[in-house]
Amino acid sequence: VRWHEETKLDVYRPDPRIYCSVMEVHGACSPPEIAFQRVHQIFQDMKSMCPNEEIDTITCTRVCGCLAESKHPDSGDAARRLLDEMLDSYFNEGNLRRKPGQAAFSAVLKAYGRSGQADKAQELVKEMERLAEDTGDSSFAPTQVHLSALIWAFAGSGDVEKAQSTMLRMQKDFGSEVEMDAWEGLLVAWSESR
């Protein structure tokens, strides 16, 4: 960034991939408070330095993932605000480059789970179901990955009953092909309830 500021040469202007890589390091390695602050600040810097069209679905999804990795208590809400920006940009502005994919929803669910907000994770899954139904776009429908993240969120908040009911739903929807991650989340919920 400093080279770009000093030289004014575009060749030195970091693109979103560079900013995201730095955020990922902070999200994974820094203490929660520092990670959360740095991810937020770097994202703001990126938005001021990079053209808006460069900040696409992949970039926003990576930022949501960085927030989840920070394990900060406010990471779920911050990731959700970014997801809401993506949804607004896609639905109200017709920006196809900001349509949130399944990975974006997964990152927000993970952030909610890691910040102990299982109720908000459940609300997001319900919203995904509404979006899929209202738009006819099955890419918004919750998958096993999303429901596994919901089980882990319930496990983290100590709500065994909701973790079990989510597993029953998965067995109904996906049969015997339920992913191992969901079973692991349920086992954690059971083991921590005793």
Image (cartoon, grey):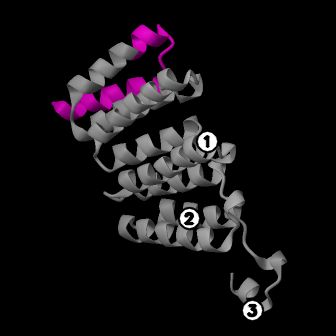
The residue that disc 3 covers is 6
Q: On the image, which quarter does residue 100 sit in?
A: top right
The residue that disc 1 covers is 99
Neighbor class of circle 2 (other Cα within 10 Å; few <14, some 14-19, many 20+) is: many
Q: Is residue 168 above or below residue 52?
A: above
Query: In this picture, which residue range is highlighted in magenta?
Result: 170-194
The residue that disc 2 covers is 23
* Image x and y of residue 126, in percent: 37, 28
Q: Is residue 191 covered in magenta?
A: yes
Instruction: Work out whether residue 140 or residue 16 is closer to the camera in this orientation and state it.
Output: 140
The kind of secondary structure element at disc 1 is: loop
Q: Amino acid at mark 1?
A: Lys
Instruction: Work out whether residue 93 or residue 69 is closer to the camera in this orientation and state it.
Output: 93
Q: Is residue 192 above or below residue 25?
A: above
The kind of secondary structure element at disc 3 is: helix
Majority secondary structure of magenta residues: helix
Q: Nearer the viewer, mark 2 or mark 1?
A: 1
Q: Is residue 1 above or below residue 135?
A: below
What residue is drawn where x is 48% and y is 21%?
133
* Image x and y of residue 178, in percent: 47, 17
* Residue 84 appears in the rendering: yes
* Residue 141 appears in the rendering: no
Q: On the image, which quarter does residue 9 sit in?
A: bottom right
Neighbor class of circle 3 (other Cα within 10 Å; few <14, some 14-19, many 20+) is: few
**N-terminal-most mark, 2 or 3:** 3
Cα separation between marks 2 and 3:
23 Å
Taking the image as shown, residue 89 lies to the left or right of residue 193, namely right
Cα separation between marks 3 and 1:
35 Å
Q: Is residue 112 above or below residue 192?
A: below
Q: Nearer the viewer, mark 2 or mark 3?
A: 3
